[in-house]
Image (tube, rainbow, N blue to C red):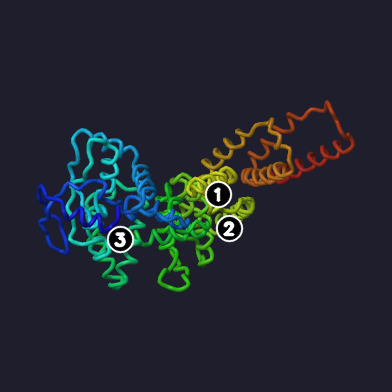
Amino acid sequence: MDKNIRVAKIAELKPYGKTEIRWEDKLETMDIYKIPLQYLVYNKYNGRILSRTKSLEKQGQVIDVESEDGAKKISQLLWDSKLDRNKKTLKSLDTYGQEKVGIVTKDGIIIDGNRRAMLLNKIDKYDYFKAVVLPVELDENPLEIEKLETSHQMGEDKKLDYNPIEKYIKVKELMNKLLVQYNEVDAKKKIEEWMNEPLSKIENYIDVMETMDDYLDNLEYDGIYTQLDGREDHLISLTKWKKSFLNLKETPPSATGSKKAFDNYASDDVDDLINIAYDYIRVRHEGKDFRKISEGKKENHLFGSQEVWKSFKEKHFNQSDKAVEQEEEINFDFQNIEAHLNDRDQKYKENIGKYLKQNLNDHYQLIRNKQYQDEPEKLVKNAKRAIEAISPNSDSLSSDVVQNEVKDLNRIINELLLKSPLKTLEYINELLTNVTLDNIEDEERLREEVFKINKTSFDLKKQLGR
């Protein structure tokens, strides 16, 4: 339906009740109407589906909400946004009807109630939407409408009904719009008021959104916000690490000398940390393990030890660089870009996910070992259990790499054993007792070794005064 026709049709409606809403910083009494659903248009930038519509538009898709195709697309996005909750609300609407009044502009754009209107369109017995009509069209006072929508949806519902990523995008969009009229400080205060959140929370949303944008840009996914799904907690942690290790007020950022990182680290080290974290975020590595990279006190994570971090970093990039080289190019013309990129990320995970987990666990064990360096009994028992877990039938046991590691391990064990002469000699005697002469490879060399042992034993006796 044409915009002018919608305006005229809505203006002809008769009110059936009244309610109060905040409009232009006052509590206004407004009429409530039963507006035929055919007169209404979804708001494609509704906070509930902002990440989806932005992702589609980044692909070059034009969403004309006034067209039948555009309305279907927005309806599907709204339905998919909270499937379980939508099914529950649909049942309630079918039984009791619409209980909460919505808000629309005088040209029929739904400001509050897009999800309810979508669900009512699925119920045959309802052909109208209860709503107040604002005294403006959408483009006549966009900032006041933005304020109204934000306070009703983000402030009132506390965002529990929203995809977690939507609130970050919403704050970013609000900042971009408000900075046209206000300075940065005042813009943040406006959002604080509209969203009913403390200023510190708003600033955190902004900081995390910057990390999110950088993450997407790093993968060449910029603007495709669907690829942030399931990664919020990881990105929050990474943002905290960045703020802790970098002085973000400087350009370019420089290391601040945080006591939570290894001594004398540089901004390049933090860049490596960020890029490594992106790989773990991409595969959606388990959150508790992810925090072992750089969370908490210096002695509790990998970035707190220069020696451990260097080894971890080198092994990581050696493997991840190969994985990236094997990836196919992104096809931005793919009809379902979300499915395409999810498949691409899944293949990356299948290629490198196990290695990322193993590399992190191996190096975190080094951190744990450092913590127990003054508790040798605990470390020795752990090492013994690890050795006992090796299968003697493993094909790789005889490989040069494994055998060289065994030799190094044996050398280390011998050095530790030599700390106790008594235990060392007991061990040697145990070995000698178990030697059999059934299969002699070289009898002459064997006699020479026995002679050396005898001489060494005699020298030890002399040192003991016997």
What residue is rendered at 34% in x and 66% in y?
176
Instruction: Give the numbered dot on residue 363.
Output: 1
For the residues bearing labels 1 and 2, Cβ distance under 8 angstroms: no
Label 1 and label 3: CA atoms lie apart by 36 Å
Looking at the image, which is closer to me, 67 or 265? 67
Q: Quick one: SS at disc 2?
A: helix
Circle nearer the N terminus (2, 3): 3
Q: Residues within 10 Å of mark 2 (few under 14, many from 20)?
A: some
Label 1 and label 2: CA atoms lie apart by 10 Å
Q: Quick one: SS at disc 3?
A: helix
Task: Give the amino acid type for the residue marked by disc 2 in the picture.
Answer: Lys
Is residue 374 something that shows in the picture? Answer: no
Task: Give the amino acid type for the residue marked by disc 3 in the picture.
Answer: Ile
Circle nearer the N terminus (1, 3): 3
Residue 14 image point, x, y percent: 12, 50
Residue 93 image point, x, y percent: 22, 37
Label 2 and label 3: CA atoms lie apart by 36 Å
In the picture of the structure, the residue carrying the numbered disc 2 is: 310
Q: Closer to us: mark 2 or mark 3?
A: 3
Q: Residues within 10 Å of mark 3 (few under 14, many from 20)?
A: many
Task: Give the amino acid type for the residue marked by disc 1 in the picture.
Answer: His
Q: Is residue 56 left or right of residue 117?
A: right
Instruction: Give the numbered dot on residue 202.
Output: 3
For the residues bearing labels 1 and 3, Cβ distance under 8 angstroms: no
